[in-house]
Image (cartoon, rainbow, N blue to C red):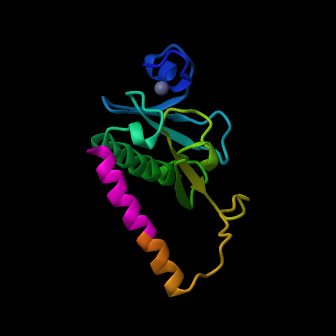
Amino acid sequence: VADDCVFCRIVAGTAPASVVYRDETVLAFLDIRPMTPGHTLVVPVRHAAALADLDPVTGGPLFAAGQRLAAALRWSSLRCAGVNFFLADGVAAGQEVFHVHLHVLPRYPGDGLRVKAAFGTPSRADLDRTATAVRDGLAAAARADG
Ligand SMILES: [Zn+2]
C-alpha cells in the first residue's frame, strides 16, 4: 500500500468511494468526475503504479471484472446502449492517478464522447513497418523481463 495513493486509501477504506464491486483481487467504484453516469473504475487491490508494475495474473481478473460491470451497466436503469473500456498508462496517455485503473464507460447516442483517430488510413507497407516496431518491442520487453 502506498500511503500517498488515493486508490490504495479507497481499497483500505480510509478514503470515501461509491463501491460497486469487490473481491480479493479487484475493487470497482464510481469515478468522481464521470464522463457519463455510471462511469466506473476497476483497480487492483494490490498497488501497481503502471502496467509494467502490474502482476500479469491480475490483468485477467481486472478485465473480467470490467466485463461483469459492462453487463451490469447494460442491465441497470442507467443509460447504457454500449460500453467503452479505457486504460491510461503514463502521463502522455492521460494517467492522473498512478495506481492502474480500467475505466468502464457507459455509452449512449448523443453522450458527446468522442474517440478520434488522428493518423488517417496508413498503407499496408506503413502498417507492416509499424508491426515490425511492435514485434521488436515485444522482444525487447521479454529481454527486459529476463
Ligand atoms: Zn495505490
**Residue 24's image quarter?**
top left
Quarter of the image where the N terminus is located: top left
Question: Does the magenta segment cover residue 137?
Answer: yes
Question: Does the magenta segment cover residue 14?
Answer: no
Vertical order, 4 against 131 (above or below): above
Q: Nearer the viewer, residue 90 or 27?
A: 90
The range drawn in magenta is 133-146
**Residue 91's image quarter?**
top right
Q: Residue at x 54, y 61 (%)?
A: 82
Quarter of the image where the C terminus is located: top left
**Residue 122's image quarter?**
bottom right
Vertical order, 10 against 90 (above or below): above
Vertical order, 34 against 84 (above or below): above
* Residue 12, position as x, y percentages in the image: 44, 17
Q: Residue furthest bottom?
A: 124
Q: Nearer the viewer, residue 77 or 80?
A: 80
